[in-house]
């Protein structure tokens, strides 16, 4: 069943979000009486029936409210170095599908690309579309920061996995299987194409006494930033049944 975002205010009557109206009426040619699944960035999904169609407005009534089973059950946050081109869109889309709760993009010393509020808004739209496609109703939060400001955002995580291409190969994920399974809130930190500088690694090392930060290797091969992010999110979601 098609899924669309709705404006829900604890009422049995709802309106479809403005961005969805043209697609429903002009592209899909949906009519009064047609059913769809409404979502509104909460933990529920709403079976709706269209009651009225106007040029820029579609109204519906809620037939059924139920918990969305596709929402992530574990708290996984991805800290992603801003990548070049459309890679940020790809990472956002796939991380949403894999159950990431939040994506924090950051700029670091070797970051080539830069992000601003307009790019951030586009990524939020990508996340919303990915939610509709994969069946979840909770949209991951997306924000932008600087690497040297990560400290405050990493507080209260049970486990922090810092992916570093120069880390010893034997310090792999195999060492952290139980930690991942036993952690309620996990942070994954992945650099952009240029990786991390020695000063940034030292910065993270200095935080190890305060936070549960672990330097991780994914093996002898150097992976692209988008490959690393998706591989990590997939692996953790599998272990956590997420």
Image: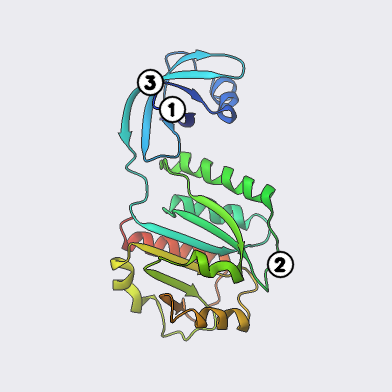
Secondary element at image label 1: loop
Secondary element at image label 3: loop
Q: Quadrant of residue 177?
A: bottom left
Residue drawn at (36%, 68%), measured in percent from left and top?
158
- Looking at marks 2 and 1 on the same chain, the residue that comes earlier in the sequence is marked by 1
Residue with the mark numbered 1: 9
Q: Quadrant of residue 3?
A: top left
The nearer-to-camera label among 2 and 1 is 1
Q: Is residue 185 left or right of residue 207?
A: left
Work out how far the residue at label 3 is from the one at label 1, CA to CA, in angstroms: 9 Å
- Looking at marks 3 and 2 on the same chain, the residue that comes earlier in the sequence is marked by 3
| Image coordinates for residue 35, horizontal then vertical, percent | 40, 21
Residue with the mark numbered 2: 112
Is residue 167 depicted above or below 68 in this figure?
A: below
Residue with the mark numbered 3: 12
Q: Quadrant of residue 125?
A: top right
| Image coordinates for residue 32, horizontal then vertical, percent | 46, 13
| Image coordinates for residue 124, horizontal then vertical, percent | 57, 46
Residue drawn at (29%, 66%), measured in percent from left and top?
181
- Disc 3 crowd rating (10 Å Cα; few below 14, some 14-19, many 20+) is some
Work out how far the residue at label 2 is from the one at label 1, CA to CA, in angstroms: 43 Å
């Amino acid at each position: 069943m098609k899924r669309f975002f709705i404006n829900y205010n604890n009422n049995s009557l709802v309106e479809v979000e403005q961005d969805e109206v043209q697609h429903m009426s002009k592209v899909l040619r949906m009519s009064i009486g047609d059913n769809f699944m409404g979502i509104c960035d909460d933990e529920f999904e709403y079976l709706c029936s269209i009651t009225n169609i106007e040029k820029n407005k579609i109204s519906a009534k809620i037939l059924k409210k139920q918990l969305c089973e596709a929402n992530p059950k574990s708290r996984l946050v991805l800290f992603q170095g801003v990548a070049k081109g459309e890679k940020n869109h790809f990472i956002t889309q796939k991380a949403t599908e894999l159950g990431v709760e939040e994506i924090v993009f950051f700029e670091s010393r070797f970051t080539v690309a830069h992000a601003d509020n307009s790019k951030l808004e586009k990524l939020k739209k990508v996340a919303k579309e990915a939610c509709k496609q994969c069946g979840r109703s909770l949209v991951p939060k997306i924000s932008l920061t600087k690497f040297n400001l990560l400290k405050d955002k990493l507080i209260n995580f049970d486990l922090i996995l810092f992916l570093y291409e120069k880390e010893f190969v034997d310090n792999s994920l195999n060492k952290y299987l139980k930690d991942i399974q036993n952690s309620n809130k996990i942070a994954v930190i992945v650099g952009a194409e240029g990786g991390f500088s020695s000063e940034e690694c030292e910065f993270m090392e200095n935080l190890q006494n305060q936070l549960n930060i672990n330097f991780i290797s994914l093996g002898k091969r150097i992976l692209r930033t988008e490959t690393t992010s998706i591989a990590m999110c997939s692996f953790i979601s599998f272990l956590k049944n997420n």
